[in-house]
Amino acid sequence: MTSPGELERTLRSQLRGEVDFGAAARALTTMDASNYRRVPAGVVAPRDAGDVAAALRICADAGVPVVPRGGGTSIAGQATGVGVVLDLTRHMNALVSVDPVARTAVVQPGLVLDRLRDAVRPYGLAFGPDPSTHARCTLGGMIGNNACGAHSVAWGTTADNVSELAVTAYGGSSYRLGTGWAGAPEGLRELVAGNLAVLRTGLAGGFSRRISGYGGLDALLPERGARVARAFCGSEGTLGVVTEAVVRLVEAPRAPVLVVLGYADESAAADAAAGLLGAGPLTVEGMARDLVPGTAASGLPRGDAWLFVEMRDEGAARSLVRGADAAHSLLVTDPAGQRALWRIREDAAGTATRTPEGGMAWPGWEDCAVPPVRLGAYLREFRALLAAHGLRGTPYGHFGEGCVHVRIDFDLVSPAGIARFRSFSGELADLVVSHGGSLSGEHGDGQARAELLPRMYGPEVIALFGAYKDVWDPAGGMNPGMLVRPARLDENLRFAVLPPGGGELSEGVARCVGVAKCRTTEVGGPGVMCPSYRVTGEERHSTRGRARLLHEMLAGEVVTDGWRSREVAEALDLCLSCKGCRSDCPVGVDMAAYKAEFLHHHWSGRIRPPAHYLLGGLPRLLRTVALLRAATPLNAAARLLPPPGLTRDRPLPPLSPTPFTRWWRSRPGASSASPAFEARVRAEPGFGKGRGGESRPQGPGATAATAATATAATAVTLWPDTFTEYLSPQTGRAAVRVLEAAGLEVTVPRGPVCCGLTYVSTGRLDRARAVLRRTLTRLEGAPDRPVVVLEPSCAAALRTDLPALLPDDPRAHRLAAAVRTFAEALEQYAPHWRPPRLDRPVVGQTHCHQHAVLGDAADRRLRERAGLTGELSGGCCGLAGNFGFEPGHHAVSVACAQEQLLPSLDAARNDRPAILADGFSCRTQIAQLSPYRAHHLAELLADGLRAERPAHTP
């Protein structure tokens, strides 16, 4: 038998594309978006159809299986395998041509669906099937699974929208499939001729979502025109590899209208769905209240379940509402309003991955389907079956097609839990079949359901499936274990290899279900994840890829050197620790936290890179410089000779000669509280009285309305973070001015305090804990009051990293709960204060940590009240604290900024906007890569106060 080394050498010698049998490449492809894991021998990224044919010939000669793989978003295990994985996304991802007159497109298998949709949109066309993973799923994967999506009630499945396929079989033979027998493999026509009765009785008469098995074989019947290409769809890579496809396009509606119908409960909505199909809807989507947060439900019609129905125009929509039996309805023509409502429905997919208590719910029975008229009855029995097994899941999905998505809180680790998973699966399969349904209605059977196909199809159909597979793949080398002669549904579970009691890291990487939202390259919107993947396009730089490598590191089978792993270190090196995945990932994977833990172990007992000491120890280093009053000579030295261990591609930001707290202490009557504030307080009539109804002392810029409605002053602590203290003290001075103007008493801690961020980001967790304990001790005895943190990354560290690092210290939790952003403090503690009117457009950057951890709702409201109009850029600035100053990161850092931030500044330059960036890193990146200068919101408001009424600033 050919050894892996011999196979790799042979493939390298005969293919133009990449061949990688290394640990990292194998680890990245052990899993898809399912519960399963299989370790491949290696990964090949073919450049063209010739490479595919050569790889299939070489692997067949060696007796090694082949698994074609697109976006890796399959949820039933069909994109995992033990042989050679063909990565069709790296090179074979082109849109070859578009014919808008014929309404067709020629595509390669690795083309992401959204790229096709974007290309044909100017022609008023679309590709009908639109699964929720449209931003990262590939056309090849859609063909393999016969994918559907929300619009299948109007435009059908992928099989309904494919005209021709170029296919290469195991061994290297190539075929061109369409309608008719020309180009089909030898023996296929004879197989059909000998099984006409089975095809007509065992497969005919199904419904639109019968995706399971080779369910499209009835397309080969003579009365159906022998549609060989259609029959090939849904074969899950078990027959051959698609190298090119001709797909049909549909006319996109110009002004679709969304109707949301409210029902008393889920069953009522399900019962009503089938009755709407006669109106010709584009979509009929259903969900119940248990998937909708309370605030989101306020925008929906009254009810506990809803149908989202999209119609082609307003007339059709109003007609639908008149004919529907819903008690309440909402008709939306405005595209922005429609997007907001669809977001509620789309967010359900993320909500479904968690139980109400925050536990995980898993795929496996994600997409069963029954005829729509049976959906209500099926859902009632399905809920009862879950309860009987002590399981929970929340159904939602394509009610107009009878297809239900659900993730269930299976225990896939313990023997008892796995046994329950198996018994439940068998009973659910029987329930689906009893309603005339399909075990898969959208995503394919893979390993999750193929074992149960005999319960759905009779023995003659199952035998026909095997014969069909053998016509295409007599050697059995294409994706074995799927559909025909399948593995057991409780084999190869991906959780089995993780060490018991692996802690938070093990739980975190297991939580990554692989839906690959981190692989999207869509530009625009508030999302951040995953900036380095968006630059490199490499799987190892996606959140999912890094989670897979950590999973395999903990498993120890593929990545064998544990915490010292070079493969994991290289993948994490380009992680910006932006925390975007914490909010943007549907299951809340927090790669920044995992990176910190990995670096902590990886460098334990070893000399670290210089950047870890220089940048990781920045607070202590800058405090020493300040004590020595050496900022000016150090700035001069840094201009001439950058510190060793840091990149030479960018200058260091200059240190301020006067740190913020030195300025604070130098003012007349300096104390921990603002002396100017104390003077005004003492001058107030009634100073020293109780809090029962006195007027709040007013700072510069305060209004009469504020004075009339304010109560006693609230004292807030302004946190002197490292960046504000030593690098941007003008931000702190501006914040003091604004907070006092709002009538707040400002205090500053007497001694140096630190959030530990720089130590966390470089993985010096023991040092971070020591720093945080010292900070908490310094704060002891200080009055409990809100803590205003100007730097978003420091606020996020105090709010999340602090209690995570010191979980048993009650002081840590008290401080975390006290943290407020600048805008939050003004909104919560000075609600009646009116900020100065700036009345100008604003552009800039929302800090990644603010987006992911803190939220920016209060900032948006404050900007609106100040007359700052426009949206800030999404994405990541790319500097990300220490990341942009470390060697080897500069190109990625700049590319991140060039994706959204810098273009947004250039696009708005004629409007002369205010440029806003609360993060010091964001401001530094803007200053170093553009002709613009950005400001913290406190600086903009302070400038506005000066313009409104010049006042002495203490």
Image (spheres, grey):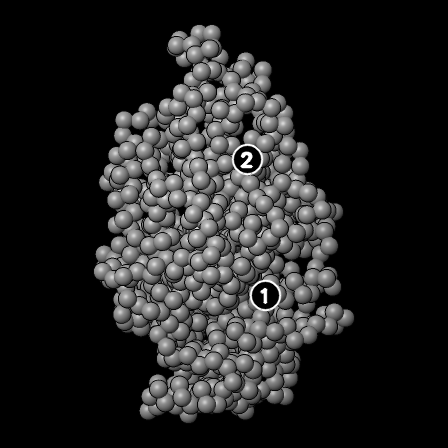
Image quadrant where residue 887 sits: bottom left
Q: Nearer the viewer, residue 19 or 889?
A: 889
Please tell me whether residue 128 is drawn above or below residue 278 in the rendered image.
Answer: below
Tell me if residue 405 comes above or below residue 908 in the rendering: below
- Taking depth in this image into account, of 462 and 895 the one nearest to the observer is 895
Residue located 49% across and 12% down the image? 695
Give the x, y percent position of residue 440: 47, 65
Amino acid at circle 2: Glu
Residue 941 screen position, x and y as percent: 57, 32
User: In this rendering, which labeled residue sits more in front, label 1 or label 2?
Assistant: 2
How many C-alpha atoms fall within 10 Å of the one at disc 2: few (<14), some, or many (≥20)?
A: many
Residue placed most toward the observer, 345 or 756: 756
Residue 939: mark in rendering: 2
10 Å neighbourhood of mark 1: few (<14), some, or many (≥20)? Answer: many
Residue shown at 38%/52% (left/top)?
A: 615
Would you say residue 768 is visible in this rendering?
A: yes
Residue 872 can be seen in this image = no
Give the quadrant of residue 628.
Answer: top left
In percent of width and height, residue 457 lies at 45, 72
Kindly state the secondary structure of the residue where label 1 is placed.
helix
Give the structural element (helix, strand or loop) at label 2. Answer: helix
Q: Label 1, on which residue?
A: 113
Image coords of residue 460 (percent x, y): 44, 79
Write the residue at 52% across / 72% down: 89
